[in-house]
């Protein structure tokens, strides 16, 4: 009986750790679509059961103080560092969807969905209208 209880406790803790490891929240390194160079670190966080992502670090030399010149509304001319670029994604099975992602380079917002390829690789899809009309990026998890 003691072995059974101990086994159940081990399984419970293993399940908790696996669940935490499979979260989209955390810090993610983004990459330039054209050059493949690292661009930024985005911190994805949960607030009121929705997912948001904020640029917390600019990795491109000389662009650390760049502003979102082409953005509209309250984000226009705001520093990209600190800018919330992913907003309002809701969980649907293994995917977070129903929100938007902002491309600070062109100032445009796109519909968005994200999901984990594995615990350290995030698939980020931004699109217009239908998911077929868009682009996909893969972000890599980084430690703090």
Image (cartoon, grey):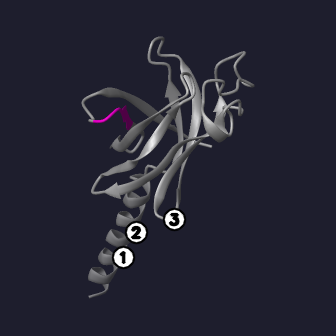
| Residue 119 on image: x %, y % | 39, 45
Q: Are marks 1 and 2 in contact (CB under 8 Å)?
A: yes
Q: Residues within 10 Å of mark 1 (few under 14, many from 20)?
A: few
- Residue 126 in magenta stretch: yes
Rendered image: mark on residue 73: none
Q: What is the magenta segment's predominant secondary structure?
A: strand
Q: What secondary structure is found at the residue carrying circle 2?
A: helix
- In the drawing, what numbered circle is on residue 48? 3
Question: Which marked residue is nearer to the observer: mark 3 or mark 2?
Answer: 3
Give the residue at the far right of this rendering: 65
Magenta residues? 123-129
- For label 1, the residue is 9
In front: mark 3 or mark 1? Answer: 3
Which numbered tag is attached to residue 13? Answer: 2
Q: Earlier in the sequence, mark 3 or mark 2?
A: 2
Residue in the foreground of this view, choosing between 5 and 106: 106
Left or right: 22 in relation to 62: left
């Amino acid at each position: 009986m003691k072995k059974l209880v101990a086994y159940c406790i081990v399984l419970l803790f293993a399940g908790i750790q696996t669940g935490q490891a499979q979260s989209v929240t955390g810090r993610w390194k983004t990459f330039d679509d054209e050059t493949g160079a690292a661009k930024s670190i985005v911190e994805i966080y949960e607030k009121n059961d929705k997912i948001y992502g904020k640029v917390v670090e600019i990795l491109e030399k000389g662009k650390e103080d760049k502003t979102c010149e082409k953005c509209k509304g309250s984000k226009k001319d705001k520093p990209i560092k600190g800018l919330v670029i992913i907003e309002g994604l809701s969980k649907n099975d293994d995917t977070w969807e129903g929100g938007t992602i902002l491309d600070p380079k062109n100032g445009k917002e796109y519909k968005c969905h994200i999901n984990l390829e594995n615990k350290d690789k995030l698939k980020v899809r931004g699109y217009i209208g239908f998911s077929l009309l868009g682009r996909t990026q893969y972000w890599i998890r980084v430690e703090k």
